[in-house]
Image: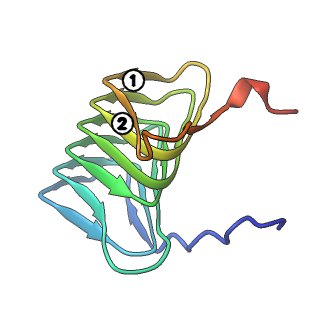
Amino acid sequence: MFGKKKQPPIRSLIGEGTRIEGTLAFGEGLRIDGEVVGDVVASGEGPNVLVISEKATVRGKVKAGHVIINGNVIGPVHSDELLEIQPKARIVGDVSYQALEMHQGATIQGELLPLRAEERPALTLAATKAA
């Protein structure tokens, strides 16, 4: 609606209580409710979305187009499109992004690195949005 891209479907789920070790590559959409020890990287062409829920922990690099974090990430985060950092998110590592939306309560221990440093980054404060 009004220029927003349609989100790809979430076809894969790492359930709560599940632990994965090693590199995890996915296409289209992935939701993590469990624990991943290793990198989580979107592969293939086209749009993709990664959701790290409030129950999830990722220890490794996170890289995808649209990234939504409400859990714990220990490692660098890279978003080619939109990075949404929700209230319960805890990130320890550098964060690079095209556009950033960060909610009150979220924490980042690392640098914020816009992908287009020569331009002013697209930054939206969630608290300033109309309710």
Is residue 97 or residue 47 the one in the foreground?
A: 97
On screen, residue 3 above or below 19: below
Mark 1 and mark 2: Cα distance apart in space: 8 Å
Give the image location of residue 128, x and y in percent.
77, 25
Horizontally, residue 82 falls left or right of residue 91, namely right
On screen, residue 77 above or below 80: above
Is residue 70 or residue 3 the one in the foreground?
A: 3
> The disc labelled 2 sits on which kind of residue?
Val
For marks 1 and 2, give the one nearer the viewer. Answer: 2
Horizontally, residue 11 falls left or right of residue 100, namely left
Is residue 93 or residue 29 the one in the foreground?
A: 93
Scheme by which the image is coloured: rainbow
Which quadrant is the N terminus positioned in? bottom right
Circle 2 sits on which residue?
95
Horizontally, residue 97 falls left or right of residue 35, namely right
Task: Report which quarter residue 22 is drawn in.
Answer: bottom left
Give the image location of residue 56, x and y in percent.
37, 42
Give the image location of residue 36, x and y in percent.
23, 49
How would you rate the neighbour count of disc 1 (Cα within 10 Å): few for under 14, some for 14-19, many for 20 or more? some
On screen, residue 77 above or below 24: above
Task: Report which quarter residue 6 is drawn in.
Answer: bottom right
Instruction: Assign a secondary structure to mark 1.
Output: strand
- Residue at figure coordinates x 87%, y 33% from the top left: 130
Circle 1 sits on which residue?
108
Is residue 100 or residue 91 the one in the foreground?
A: 100
Does the residue at mark 1 contact the one at mark 2 (Cβ under 8 Å)? yes
